[in-house]
Image (spheres, helix red, strand yellow):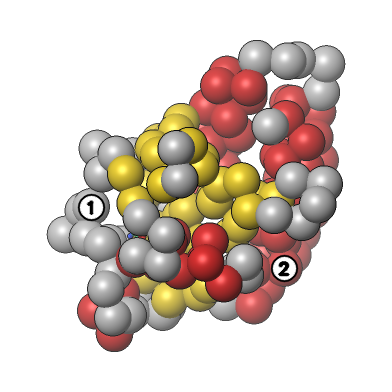
Amino acid sequence: MDKNKTYELVVKQVESLLEGENNTVGQLANAAALLHETMGWWWTGFYLIKDGELQLGPFQGPIACYRIKHGRGVCGTAWAENRTIVVPDVEQFPGHIACSSLSRSEIVVPLRNSDGEVTGVLDIDSKDLATFDETDAHWLEEIARVIERTL
Ligand code: SME
């Protein structure tokens, strides 16, 4: 299926999955599971800001590092710069944090509060190079807008 069509469906599924629930951990876990299973990525999950650093939240995939500092790695850079970062080849990203040696490409999308401040990130890794492009960035930002309402 065309990537845009797949994402259109996924946005609707995420909306209905999160609706009417107030268990944030469960909602984030289900959102990660839905995205991961549907899209076939290697690692799909959340880091949330707590005590001035990004701390590991619900995810699907191999074990991951617990804490990431502001400005460090792809996640900490997305936080510091308050923008989505697409990394076609993680080996070319200075300071990339390799939680899994099998990750080859990555996208990190900030989650924000109503003041536009970053409260966490949606982080996705792929075992293939250049998995993510501007289409993924566009749709994952739509999905982030839905998910951040649960925080
Ligand atoms: N690669 C990330 C660290 C988190 S793992 O990918 C799950 C980074 O550089 O911030």
Q: Nearer the viewer, residue 95 or 51?
A: 51
Quarter of the image where the N terminus is located: bottom right
Measure the alpha-carbon separation of dots 2 and 1: 25 Å
| Residue type beneath disc 1 | Cys
Residue at image location 46% in from the left, 31% down from the top: 58
| Marking on residue 13 | none
Q: Is residue 134 left or right of residue 86?
A: right
Residue at image location 16% in from the left, 59% down from the top: 101
| Residue type beneath disc 2 | His
Quarter of the image where the C terminus is located: top right
Near mark 1 (Cα within 10 A), the count class, few <14, some 14-19 or many ≥20, is some
Say which of marks 2 and 1 sits in front.
1
Counting from the top left corner in percent of width and height, residue 43 is at 38, 48
Residue at image mark 1: 99
Residue 36 can be seen in this image: no
Counting from the top left corner in percent of width and height, residue 110 is at 61, 57
Q: Quadrant of residue 25?
A: top right
Q: Quadrant of ligand 1?
A: bottom left
Element class at badge 2: helix
Q: Is the residue indicated by label 1 positioned so its CB lies within 8 Å of ligand 1?
A: yes
Q: Is residue 28 left or right of residue 96?
A: right
Residue 51 can be seen in this image: yes
Residue at image mark 2: 138
Residue at image location 80% in from the left, 28% down from the top: 16
